[in-house]
Every structure is written in structure tokens, then in C-alpha cells.
Image (cartoon, rainbow, N blue to C red):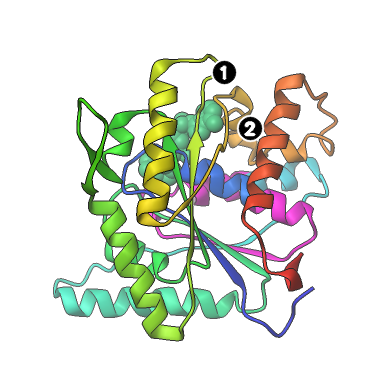
Amino acid sequence: MVTESKPYIIVLGNEKGGTGKSTAAMHLVTSLLHQGYTVGSLDVDARQGTLTRYVENRDNHIRETGLALSMPRHYPIYRSALESVTAAQEEEQQRFAQAVELLRDCEFIVIDTPGSDTYLSRLAHSYADTLITPLNDSFIDLDMLVRVNPDSLDILRPSTYSEMVWDQKKQRAIRDGGKMDWIVMRNRLSSIHSRNKEEMERVLQALSKRIGFRLVPGFGERVIFRELFLNGLTLLDMRQTNTPMTLSHLSAKQELNALIEKINLPPQIK
Ligand SMILES: Nc1ncnc2c1ncn2[C@@H]1O[C@H](COP(=O)(O)OP(=O)(O)OP(=O)(O)O)[C@@H](O)[C@H]1O
Ligand SMILES: [Mg+2]
């Protein structure tokens, strides 16, 4: 276990909304907690507050049931209400730095970001040791990463989000010489074979080399990834709640474990 070193920061990001950032964030948090790590979590999408609600629901559920479940140390970070852009950014930077400082003794910090471009989101990206971008299997979602030729599906140029990630990689390197590992995970994958699925695979494989991310399969479309939100639980808590596991639950668990494995954590925190 690490104590003196800095927390390992995992950021969930994609400027496209509804791709599974908050869902993946909560599942990573619980997975790391189950492995015995101390985990901090930050919600820089505090206005929507999905991760914050998820953690609050977990806290309430523990109080109501007395279940022995671990909790992350969680802070929502709100956007500044100051009118001047410079002053607002300065305030947001301070809020972010304070929250990271409060979580300094955690082994991991998991950060959920909004499905839009905000200063806080960019700042969070620039702190990522690992950035995970969930992506639904749709060319609408892919459009945020890359423009492709509609007929040949050849890659034309990177799009807004990819460019933002590049900028934040540079910011990170300037600030502390650190490197960001970028993982794109496909989410809500259908179990049915389709031409769309195949074409997405082909474009993403080509793109991963071109703009420097690692592609992982991610999560299938499964009810278990969404149905435990109100109790603040994930499929990893089912043993404690004495809920029997189905085959689909087991597959979901494998998908989550595979994602954690793909993160390639540095040896000292394995
Ligand atoms: N693998 C999955 N299987 C089934 N449902 C999923 C899966 N992943 C996400 N969902 C559902 O998809 C919706 C969007 O997920 P989520 O809120 O995590 O996305 P998000 O990227 O955080 O969205 P936003 O950009 O609005 O913050 C939710 O209803 C969630 O329950
Ligand atoms: Mg979200």
C-alpha cells in the first residue's frame, strides 16, 4: 500500500453527454474500495451531481441497513458564480486544488466530469494519470473524437474532444512532467453482431494508433449497471446484500475486472 506517494488519479471524461462516465466512475470507485484501497472521489459535474447522488445514496443505504460497506471520501466541486472569467477560473482552480489536497492521503482519486466543455473539466483532465473515455457504439458519439469520411470511413481529422485531451496532456507535462494514459472504452455494447459494431471497431482501432489511446471493450448493455443507483450500490456489493448473482451479473463483473486490469496500475499500488 502507498502512503507517502501521491494518489493515482483516474478521470472519466467525454464531452458527449450520456456515454457512461458517472456509471463507470461509481463502478471503479466500488471496485477499488473492494480491493481495500482508500478512495477519494470528486464530482466536477456537481450541478448534475450524478456521482454525488450515487455516493449519497450509498451513505443513506448504509445508515438504513447497517451494512458494512466501504465509502469513498467524496467532494462535489461547484462552478464559480463570479462574473469575470479570470476570477472565476482562479476560484475554480482553488476549489479543485483544495479538494485534491483534502484527498492527498488516498491511494486513488476518481473524478467524474460533465458531458460538456467547462474549465473545471479541462482542469480535471490535466490531472489524469489515466483518462477513461466511455463511448457508446454510435457514429454520433464517435464524432466527438474524430471526423470520418461517410463513405470510406477514412479518418479525416481529430475532433474537439481529442484536441482538448491533447492540450491537457501538454498542460500535465508542463506542470509536473507526468504522463496521461488515455483509454477509450466502448460502453453499452450489444451482444448482437452488427455491421455498425464492426465498423466502429475498425475506425476505433485505426484511430487509437493515430491519436494515441488504448481501446478496450468496456461494458455490455446490462440492467445491472444501472439498477442499483437508488441504493448507491453496484454489482460488487451483491455479496454483502445477499443478492444472488445471475450469469449476466457475472459477465458484468468480468467486464469491470477487465477494465481495472487494463488500467495497468503502477506496480507499487497493485
Ligand atoms: N453498460 C450500461 N448498461 C446499461 N445502462 C447503462 C450502461 N452504462 C450507462 N448506462 C445508463 O446510461 C445512461 C447514461 O449513463 P451515465 O449517466 O453514466 O452517463 P454520463 O456520461 O455520466 O452522462 P452525462 O454526460 O449526462 O454526465 C444512464 O441512464 C445509465 O444508467
Ligand atoms: Mg455523468
Say which mark, if any, is on residue 191.
Answer: 1
Residue 32 covered by magenta stretch: yes
Quadrant of residue 147 within the rendered picture: top left
In the rendered structure, which amino acid carries the disc numbered 2? Leu
Asked if the residues shown at circle 2 and circle 1 are in contact, with their CB atoms under 8 angstroms apart, the answer is: no
Q: Quadrant of ligand 2?
A: top left
Task: Classify mark 2: helix, strand or loop.
Answer: loop
Residue 87: image location, x then y, percent: 21, 80
Q: What residue is at 34 percent from the left and 40 percent from the top?
A: 17
Report the number of discs: 2
In which quadrant will I find the N terminus?
bottom right
Say which mark, if any, is on residue 74.
Answer: none
Which residue bears the numbered disc 2?
A: 228
Nearer the observer: mark 2 or 1; the answer is 1
Quadrant of residue 102 within the rendered picture: bottom right
Q: Which residues are magenta?
A: 29-57
Quadrant of residue 197 within the rendered picture: top left
Please state which of residues 83 and 123 is positioned toward the viewer in this rendering. 123
Q: What residue is at 46 percent from the left and 83 percent from the top?
A: 177
Up/down of 113 relative to 190, above or below? below
Up/down of 37 relative to 93, above or below? above
Asked whether mark 1 lies closer than 8 Å to ligand 1, one says no
Give the mark nearest the N terminus, 2 or 1: 1
Left or right: where 158 falls relative to 68: left
Q: What residue is at 30 percent from the left and 46 percent from the top?
A: 145
Residue 81: image location, x then y, percent: 23, 67
